[in-house]
Structures are given as structure tokens and as C-alpha cells.
Image (cartoon, grey):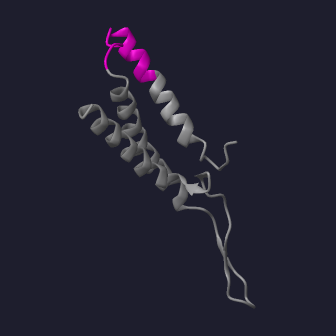
Amino acid sequence: MIIWKGFGILNIVIPGVLFFIVNTLLSSLGLGSIDSRLPLAFVFIVSGVIIWYLGKAFNTDLGKVLVDMETGERYQTGTGHSLFFIPMHYWGPIGLAAGFILIVATIFT
């Protein structure tokens, strides 16, 4: 089960679409025989950067902040954008790390 809020589903859609585009492009250029970890690393790195900036843009203006007059507690209205309860922009560095780990794994194997 996938749990998302707002545009958090883009954390899955963006790498999926980018992976399809990269594989189609490599196949049409006749480069389908290269190590499959390198295109996947490229997809993770590029989608990590895209997701970071989109997440920061989407999560900056979440709505109004309401203050309870009796308790002084603050409530924020609006929808945050998250996937598995992790804000969208935090998935960007996760994608970057996964991409660099795949590059290192490709070099040392």
C-alpha cells in the first residue's frame, strides 16, 4: 500500500517516467547492453534533484496558521505533500544517495 498526501505521489511518478524515457532513448541509440545500474543511477540522481525543488516549492506555502486563543497552540491549515509520511523534498536527497551508491557499486564490481 502506498500512502501519500497532496502531490507526494510524484515521488514515484517522476522516477518512473524518467526511467521509461532513459531506457527508450538508450534502446533506440543501440546502447541497451550497458550495465543497467548506470541508467538507474542517472534516473535516481536527476529525479532526486527534480523532487527536491518541486517539494520545496510545493511545501513552502501550506496555508494559514491559526492560533487557539485559550491554549496558544498553533494549527497549520492546508495540505502538505508527502510520501509514507516523509515530506516530498526529503525524498530528493534519498534519490541522490541511491544514485551515488549505484555508481560506486558499478565501479567496484
Residue 26 lies in magenta, yes or no?
yes
Q: Position of residue 4 (x, y in %)?
A: 65, 48
Quadrant position of residue 72: bottom right
Quadrant position of residue 103: top left
On screen, 29 above or below 18?
above
**Left or right of residue 64: residue 90:** left
Q: Position of residue 90 (x, y in %)?
A: 47, 55
Relative to the observer, which residue lies in front, 59 or 47?
47
**Left or right of residue 44: residue 80:** right
Residues in magenta?
21-34
Question: What residue lies at 63% left-to-right and 64% top-to-bottom?
Answer: 63
Give the quarter of the figure containing the N terminus. Answer: top right
Question: Please, which residue is most extreme toward the right here?
Answer: 70
On screen, 65 above or below 80?
below
Q: Position of residue 76 (x, y in %)?
A: 65, 70
Question: What residue lies at 44% left-to-right and 22% top-to-bottom?
Answer: 21
Give the quarter of the figure containing the C terminus. Answer: top left
Q: Position of residue 70 (x, y in %)?
A: 75, 91
Question: What residue lies at 37% left-to-right and 45% top-to-bottom?
Answer: 96
On screen, 68 above or below 48?
below
Residue 62 lies in magenta, yes or no?
no
